[in-house]
């Protein structure tokens, strides 16, 4: 009988602890939802977590002579401290207000290849919400601006999480992955590709397809006398995947009077919408693989 009562007591204690943790997780999750929806700032979220930590310390003092409750409170306080420390990192992202996209010159890595890499300048704006001041500051330095993208709390949270994953080695940088995919596909050392991949502060994976096509021309596996704007990822098996900033890359290609832009088929609908809304003349060439891009280039050159 005593043994059964002891088991019931242990079960009850564990249940109390579990309920406390569940309540904290629910509160934390609710705060995160409010933060993601831009209803509260990170400072409000941290303040509430801090108050919960203070309450835990007060309870610890009150029940310091009760071994069981004391251990439960220590566990809860530790759990709260870990969450507070994890979310505290977001303070470093709080000042980011806009990511402004702007014009960047296309780049023909292999001269005479006709394959132009399309990249977009991204200006990380911090500390100001005044768009007029931002535009004036950027355009005074002869920068051509495309879009203002507000850095919401959700974007900040995702950026923080991705940065931590990369720092911990649990995730790789997109640019590095793109470089590895290109090298695997090319199967050889090409100096201009190595130079491009060694550049500092480069981001994204959309140069992959252009690098692959440039390599094929360099290796005399493809001939081209036309001019193309090219954007798209390149997987190791030659697949071409979806990319971002389609509007900007379409506008850059049009500005440089490129007759064609090769891009992922997954981006076709968006590209056609941009073309219609801006009355662009450039011809969109959607592809699912680099082999499709090669076939299109060969066909256009044969004409």
Image (spheres, rainbow, N blue to C red):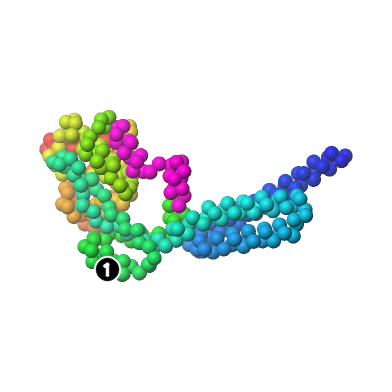
**Which residue is depicted at the point 30% across and 47% down?**
200
Q: Quadrant of the N terminus?
A: top right
* 263 and 150: which is toward the camera: 150
Magenta stretch encompasses residue 172: yes
Residue 153 lies, in percent from the top left, at 46, 59
Magenta stretch encompasses residue 152: no
* Quadrant hosting residue 214: top left
**Picture layout, residue 271 above or below residue 34:** above
Residue 244 lies, in percent from the top left, at 33, 49
Label 1 packing within 10 angstroms: few (<14), some (14-19), many (20+): few
Q: Quadrant of the C terminus?
A: top left
* 232 and 140: which is toward the camera: 140
Q: Main secondary structure of the magenta part?
A: helix
| Tally of marks | 1
**Which residue is depicted at the point 16% across and 40% down?**
113
Q: Which residues are magenta?
A: 160-185
Query: Can residue 84 be seen from the camera position used here?
Result: yes
Query: Can residue 281 be seen from the camera position used here?
Result: no
Task: Identify residue for label 1.
Answer: 136
Residue 67 lies, in percent from the top left, at 76, 50
* 152 and 190: which is toward the camera: 190
Residue 122 lies, in percent from the top left, at 31, 55
Q: Secondary structure at mark 1?
A: helix
* Quadrant hosting residue 225: top left
Answer with left or right where residue 234 lies relative to residue 280: right
**Which residue is depicted at the point 21% across and 62% down?**
142
**Which residue is depicted at the point 45% across and 41% down?**
169
Answer with left or right where residue 7 lies relative to residue 43: right
């Amino acid at each position: 009988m005593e043994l059964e009562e002891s088991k019931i007591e242990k079960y009850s204690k564990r249940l109390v602890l579990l309920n406390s943790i569940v309540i904290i997780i629910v509160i934390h999750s609710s705060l995160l939802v409010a933060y993601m929806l831009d209803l509260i700032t990170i400072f409000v979220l941290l303040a509430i977590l801090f108050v919960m930590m203070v309450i835990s310390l007060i309870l610890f003092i009150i029940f310091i002579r009760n071994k069981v409750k004391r251990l439960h409170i220590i566990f809860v306080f530790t759990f709260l401290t870990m969450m507070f420390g994890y979310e505290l990192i977001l303070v470093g992202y709080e000042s980011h207000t806009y990511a402004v996209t702007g014009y960047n010159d296309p780049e023909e890595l292999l001269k005479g290849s006709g394959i132009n890499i399309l990249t977009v300048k991204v200006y990380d704006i911090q500390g100001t919400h005044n768009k007029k001041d931002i535009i004036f500051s950027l355009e005074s330095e002869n920068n051509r601006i495309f879009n203002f993208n507000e850095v919401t709390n959700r974007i900040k949270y995702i950026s923080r999480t991705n940065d931590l994953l990369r720092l911990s080695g649990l995730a790789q940088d997109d640019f590095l992955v793109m470089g590895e995919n290109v090298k695997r596909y090319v199967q050889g050392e090409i100096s201009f590709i190595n130079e491009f991949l060694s550049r500092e502060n480069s981001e994204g994976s959309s140069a992959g397809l252009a690098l692959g096509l440039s390599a094929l021309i360099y290796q005399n596996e493809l001939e081209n006398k036309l001019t193309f704007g090219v954007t798209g990822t390149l997987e190791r098996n030659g697949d071409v995947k979806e990319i971002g900033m389609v509007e900007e890359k379409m506008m850059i290609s049009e500005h440089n009077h490129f007759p064609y832009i090769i891009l992922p088929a997954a981006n076709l609908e968006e590209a056609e919408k941009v073309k219609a809304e801006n009355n662009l003349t450039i011809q969109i060439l959607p592809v699912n693989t680099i082999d499709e891009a090669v076939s299109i280039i060969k066909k256009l050159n044969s004409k």
